[in-house]
Image (cartoon, rainbow, N blue to C red):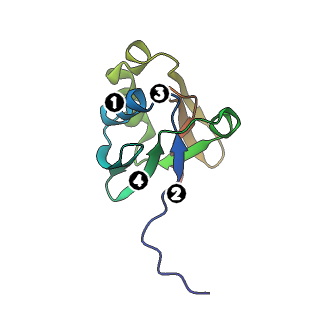
Amino acid sequence: MEHKARSIRPFIGAKDFELSRSFYRDLGFQESILGHNMSLFTTEGIGFYLQDAYVRDWIDNSMIFLEVEDVGRYWKELLALDLTAKYKGVKLTPIREYDWGRECFMHDPSGILWHFGEFFD
């Protein structure tokens, strides 16, 4: 089968939809409202759907990996946003090095785990 894929967009949930919308806008994503209970958040041609839906088992097992060009710079920009002070439940974990590359981590206000990583060449 030959694909001519243009994007892949996971669906994620939110414990508090309005709070999560604000969080992702602060993180630098552009929001397109699709309805009263769903928005598309994009950056540089990639994105995800945020839903006003919360199923704890689903959220607790959701992880998203976002590949970035420079994880060191991304980490500094994350810290500068002061998201942990502004949003209850947000957690940041510093950069870790692996044999494949480097990554840092963030839990969003609902508990979804984001990986921000950079692969070694």
Measured in 3D between alpha carbons, the distance from the residue under mark 2 to the one under mark 1, in whole angstroms, is: 35 Å
Callout 1: helix, strand or loop? helix
Q: Earlier in the sequence, mark 1 or mark 4?
A: 1
From this view, report whether residue 98 is shown above or below residue 42.
above
Q: Residue at x 34, y 51 (%)?
A: 42
Q: Are marks 2 and 1 in contact (CB under 8 Å)?
A: no
Name the residue tied to disc 2.
Answer: 121
Q: Are marks 3 and 2 in contact (CB under 8 Å)?
A: no
The amino acid beneath tag 2 is Asp
Discs 3/1, front: 3
Measured in 3D between alpha carbons, the distance from the residue under mark 2 to the one under mark 4, in whole angstroms, is: 25 Å
Q: Is residue 119 visible?
A: no
Q: Are marks 3 and 1 in contact (CB under 8 Å)?
A: no
Q: Point out which mark residue 47 bears.
A: 4
The amino acid beneath tag 1 is Ser
Q: Are marks 1 and 4 in contact (CB under 8 Å)?
A: no
Q: Where is residue 76 shown, x and y percent of the image?
A: 37, 27
Measured in 3D between alpha carbons, the distance from the residue under mark 4 to the one under mark 3, in whole angstroms, is: 20 Å
Find the residue positioned furthest to the top: 85
Q: Earlier in the sequence, mark 2 or mark 4?
A: 4
Crowding around mark 1 (Cα neighbors within 10 Å: few <14, some 14 to 19, many 20+) is few
Find the residue positioned furthest to the bottom: 1
Name the residue tied to disc 1.
Answer: 22
